[in-house]
Image (cartoon, rainbow, N blue to C red):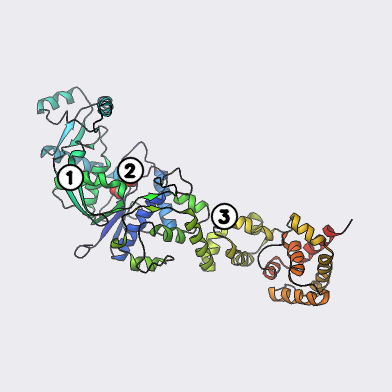
Amino acid sequence: VTVSAKPVRVRFAPSPTGYLHVGGARTAIFNWLFARRHRGTFVLRIEDTDVERSTRESETALVDDLHWLGIDWEEGPDVGGPLGPYRQSERIERYRGHARAFVDAGLAYSCFCSDELLRRKREEAEQAGTAPRYDGACRNLSAGDVEARRKQGVAEAIRFKVPDEVVRIDDLVRGQVELASDTVGDFVLIRSNGHPTYNFAAVVDDHAMGITHVLRGEEHLPNTLRQVLVYRALGADAPEFGHLPLILAEDRSKLSKRHAASSVGDLKRLGFLPEAVVNYLVLLGWSHPEGKELLSIDDMVGAFSIERVNRSAAVYDGKKLTWMNGQYIRKAPLDRLVAAAGPFLPPYVRSDYTPPAQREILDLLRDGVETLADLERASLPFRPSPPLDDEAKACVGAENSRRVLAALRVALAKAPDPVTANDFKATMKAIAKETSVGGQDLYFPVRAAITGSVHGPDLARVAAIKGKATVQASIDRALSIGRPA
Ligand code: GLU
């Protein structure tokens, strides 16, 4: 990669017409890592020239989602920067100026074809089985024709005169790519409503903002052809391009909004940690030189290179992402886990336990969950007086169980308060000796009484967190449930 001379400047340029999709997030992450790796600049540019579909809410949500992922930028609409404004809707005059200059230089022309006429021509082309591209009807209008139509008030767009040539790009990912310009007709630069098209505005801005590398999804290759032609018309060098492989769903269709958990917002709501999401997404099309899969941000920044981006499509595998999230939940610093997991704890945990007890609950439960949303179910043993499930009920009714619980009630009365996990273990040992009951016969009834189920997390830690009084009340309750009629 030729990143030697010029300092790297890359951008993420979302259109604020919806949520941040995992494909967009992957593009943002690759650009961000590339900037960080080369100590370059990462720019956020909002491509809001589609006035009907762009909203400020969507822009805010995109920015929030990027922040949630831990991505930051040096220049953007929220932080400013020397080459702003960074919202295309605030740069309209620049696009118009360049378009006028193109017209004056004979590189573009006014087009007065109505939407209705264009639609009809497209349909005719489709019926005839030919490529639906603009037929150049307005390419050779005389100055007089143009004046006459303007006087009649006919809506006027500006179209680019596509030259007849083959564009070759040396793609950072795909190598030599040839794009023949005869696959596209003269395309619109400025719509009749005065707004620029994406292919024009993106080039004007990438040029004005000094973008050195454009990393984006492979689906943009046909746009790259148009954009390279616009660069030439501007008399500017095109940046380097790297087209990232497509992301497919597990059914091998192109991943899209209709697939579950395919937006960053979905993943946030479903209880994924952003660190895990970033780690998973960076592996969609890139791999670490040593094949490492669990990567810190430092690992990624240290090892990221376009050379290791592959050409073949990546598959978005929810199971692997979930597995990876579980790994992150287990190794997260406890403070970090507490901050992320707070909103996922059920109301009874938040209201009935002190913050230090909630920390212990999380530390105990993190081994058994893959997402933070799993905490809802995993927290059930911590309900103040959990109802006993059928297995638990049958268990506490058994003869041996009743002896164990009765002995525990007595022994626990003598145990310290607050009771620690070690105190509780010692108490269990004592009653094992006293009753000559061991193993499951000893632990199952106690766990059933305290948590409502014979299965669950470490009993001594649960008992210590719930507290002596609550545990005693649970044992009394179990003895009364289990009493034979
Ligand atoms: N606004 C375009 C999009 O959202 C940007 C594509 C590009 O990176 O050039 O797809």
> Quadrant location of residue 15?
top left
Give the spatial CA distance, label 3 vs label 1: 49 Å
Amino acid at dot 2: Asp
Residue mark closest to the camera, 2 vs 3: 3
12 is higher (above) or lower (below) than 437 = above
Would you name the residue on which mark 1 appears? 229
Quadrant the C terminus occupies: bottom right
382 is higher (above) or lower (below) than 62 = below
- Ligand 1: does it lie within 8 Å of the C-beta at label 3? no
Q: Nearest the camera: 238 or 103?
A: 238
Asked whether the residues under the numbered discs 3 and 1 touch, taking CB atoms below 8 Å apart as contact, a structural biologist would say: no
Which residue of the protein is positioned furthest toward the right in this rendering? 485
Amino acid at dot 1: Leu
Q: Position of residue 194 (x, y in %)?
A: 25, 35
- Secondary element at tag 2: loop
Residue mark closest to the camera, 1 vs 2: 1
Using residue 213 as the reference point, say whether residue 107 is left or right of it.
left
Q: Earlier in the sequence, mark 3 or mark 1?
A: 1
Would you name the residue on which mark 2 appears? 48
Q: Is residue 416 visible?
A: no
Categorize mark 1 by other alpha carbons within 10 Å: few (<14), some (14-19), many (20+): many
Would you name the residue on which mark 3 appears? 373
Q: Which mark is residue 209?
A: none
- Secondary element at tag 1: helix
- Ligand 1: does it lie within 8 Å of the C-beta at label 2? no
Q: Earlier in the sequence, mark 2 or mark 3?
A: 2
Give the spatial CA distance, label 2 vs label 3: 34 Å
Counting labels gives: 3
Residue at point 69%, 76% (across, down)? 422
Q: Position of residue 392 (x, y in %)?
A: 75, 59
Amino acid at dot 3: Ala
Q: Position of residue 280 (x, y in %)?
A: 43, 59
